[in-house]
Image: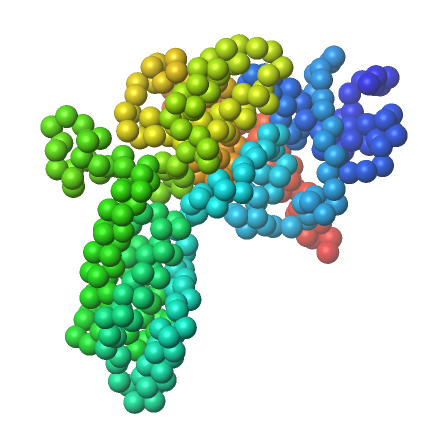
Amino acid sequence: MNFQNGLPGSLSELVTEVQRQCGIKTNFRLQFMDALFGNEFTNLISIDEVQDRGTIRMIPVTEASAPTALCHPSLDEYSSMFSMCLETDTLSTTESESSRSRQFWPTVFRVPQLSFDAELKLERGNAAYKEKGTFLIPDPKLKSNILEGLVQEIVKYKVYVTDKEFNTVGEALTSKHPCLTEKGSLTGYAGWKASLKNKLAIYRTHLRKLGCPEVVVNSVKHKPEGKTSAASAIKRPRRSEVNYCPPHPTGESDDSLENLRVALLSDVKKSNNREVVRIKMDKTFSCRRFEVVRDTPMIQDFRARWPALFDVSEINAEFKRITTMSLQSRFLSQIDLLSDKLLKVFQKRGGEMGRRLQTIMEPMAQVCQDLVCVYTFYWEKD
């Protein structure tokens, strides 16, 4: 594109000029090659990023997916909006892989639907509690049914549960079925909590026999030297790690995934081969995670085995595989929310770094001052 009068003064004017010269009537967004991210295409949000003889890319946006301009979204909406606008590479997962993927622990735990006879007993118990205030003493079959249902719901999120999370399960159970509240217990669910811990521990033993990687990694034969106790050095996911140690994709084994890893060493050196690398990195995710969790290798050793992972696009993709969230959109949304506090921290910084930050912040302060003047003008006018 040629601009006879130089670059437009604003991003909106640039969009209008692109529409005029290219004859485009549909909605779109512009991206530029960001040198800070290895010339990866990033959404254009400032006209200052456009360089003479530079390259920009146009991405069509449908009206249904386009974000509303004049709104104040929540954090989750803001993150999802940035995720739509900023992600240039999307991850494809098969149906079997997505069904085994874990989810974040919910804010409010949902007690699952139990068997027909168990729900009938609980319905009658709740009715008796509401009318007479009597508590239900569950028979062994009903108690086992309740614990089994809770465990099956818990493992959708994780197999190692904290004490606080056990409390949320107990609160949810006694809230939905108040007839199960225990007399003499301070919380009303202390006995249910203890039984649930024991039930989940037994279920983990069953999962270990079936070869669940998240539990197998904590078996005695995988313990570090000197850690022979089954309860020592337990490897558990951190709060943000949803897919901590997932199983291999269907039809894949350690040997087949190792062959893919070796093939990646040559694939990453080829040009215009990003899609092939992405697919193979997606397939070998479980192998890579088990290696990280079990062996905790040094960075230089891990980089030698997985050089493709240290590309910017693959870092973003790996972050999303582990946490199910977009790294870039999450980072930008948090920066936007915390910008006021960051500016106050920068203002208090002294020394050479403080002077450099002051030079960077001066134009930002001028822009903020101009915005305040504009808002004040319109406020007084109204």
Residue 252: quarter of image: top left
Q: Nearer the viewer, residue 134 or 6?
A: 134
Residue drawn at (31%, 60%), measured in percent from left and top? 148
Q: Nearer the viewer, residue 310 or 25?
A: 310
* Direction from residue 131 to residue 44 in the image, left or right: right
> Coloured how?
rainbow
* Direction from residue 47 to residue 292 in the image, left or right: left
Q: Whole-percent x and y of residue 207?
A: 30, 45
Q: Whole-percent x and y of residue 182?
A: 22, 74
Residue drawn at (59%, 16%), measured in percent from left and top? 273
Q: Identify whether 273 is placed above or below 59.
A: above
Q: Whole-percent x and y of residue 187?
A: 23, 68
Q: Whole-percent x and y of residue 206?
A: 27, 48
* Direction from residue 196 to residue 346 in the image, left or right: right
Residue drawn at (23%, 51%), measured in percent from left and top? 201
Residue 149: quarter of image: bottom left
Q: Quadrant of the C terminus?
A: bottom right
Q: Nearer the viewer, residue 254 or 191?
A: 254
